[in-house]
Image (cartoon, grey):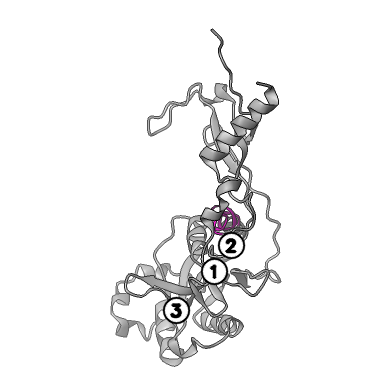
Amino acid sequence: MSYSSYSAEVAFNLRKQFGFLEDNFDEVAVNNSAFMHGNMQLVGHQERTNRFCGVYMHFVGCARVKLHNIISLDGKNYKGKVFTRLVHHWCHKPSCPVCFKSGWAVRAAGKIEARLAAASKHFGVVEHIVCSIPPKDYGLSYEALRLKAHKVLFARGVIGGCKIFHGMRYNKRKYWYWSPHWHVLGFLVGGYSRCRKCDVTKNTSNCLGCSGFEGRTRRRYKEDKYIVKVLGKRKTVFGTAWYQLNHSTIDITKKRFHVATYFGVCSYRKLKITVEQRKQLCPVCQHELGILDYLVSRLSF
């Protein structure tokens, strides 16, 4: 067997093991009419973009075994070991059922993390905020909802951040149902630590006269009926953004619909930053990863 034919055989077996093949890409086709409300649809529920989506491309890794002669805190010994990672092809489209989670959401979450990290140097801790639309506004267009959400958030002391649109919620009885809301990774006037440490917030009536966030949002709710609340502490901005992007909503009639948008102090007009491309580093020695060749040797007896 020649080297070229043997390499093709190895590549075929790798794609079969680690990625999709051209012959079975129809297996990931989905029903376009599912998970929809008008023109709005959950991400990852359109047709696969092309036959290369999710296909194995190559390995990247770190072969500096001399620098891996360490034992981690959890007892793992990396002596003489090479770190490797599979690289697949992603189209980075939120509509693609193959690429939306491992491709598009990963890249978008990385950009969100980088931008909010720059903003947090000036505006404090990033908080996870949810802005729920009242049923009386369910019939409004997306643009109208977006502008109204801005006013609602500003009125409660949210000075800026990244908004991720969710058109649907899920429960076991209704499955996916229309309930538009926004997940916001943003900043509050004075922060939220005051309210997080306060025991009074357990009693709604005691917060109405307070100048903190909980007092502001409860007073505003009586006027506009929008429920805006701060969730618990995040583990990472990247992880929160990635998870929320995984079940966000897109307008399928628009070629480039922006699921994540920035507003206030984080808008493109007010916050000018240069985002560097994230380097892939070896988790053992922290050196940059490179492309590795996959070689197979055959012993003859």
Residue picked out by circle 1: 32
Specify the label residue 47 is tagged with.
Answer: 2
Secondary element at tag 1: loop
The amino acid beneath tag 2 is Glu
Point out residue 92 in the picture as x, y percentages from the top left corner. Answer: 63, 57
Q: CA distance from mark 1 to mark 3?
A: 20 Å
Q: Viewer-nearest of labels 3 and 2?
A: 2
Q: How many other residues sit within 10 Å of disc 1, few (<14), some (14-19) or many (≥20)? A: few
- Residue range (magenta): 97-107
Which residue is farthest top? Answer: 301
The amino acid beneath tag 1 is Asn
Secondary element at tag 2: loop
Return the residue nearer the eye: 188 or 91. 91
Q: Is residue 46 above or below residue 3?
A: below
Q: How many other residues sit within 10 Å of disc 3, few (<14), some (14-19) or many (≥20)? A: some
Q: Of the residues under marks 2 and 1, which one precedes in the sequence?
A: 1
Q: Is residue 26 above or below residue 76?
A: below
Q: CA distance from mark 2 to mark 1?
A: 7 Å
Point out residue 115 in the picture as x, y percentages from the top left corner. Answer: 62, 60
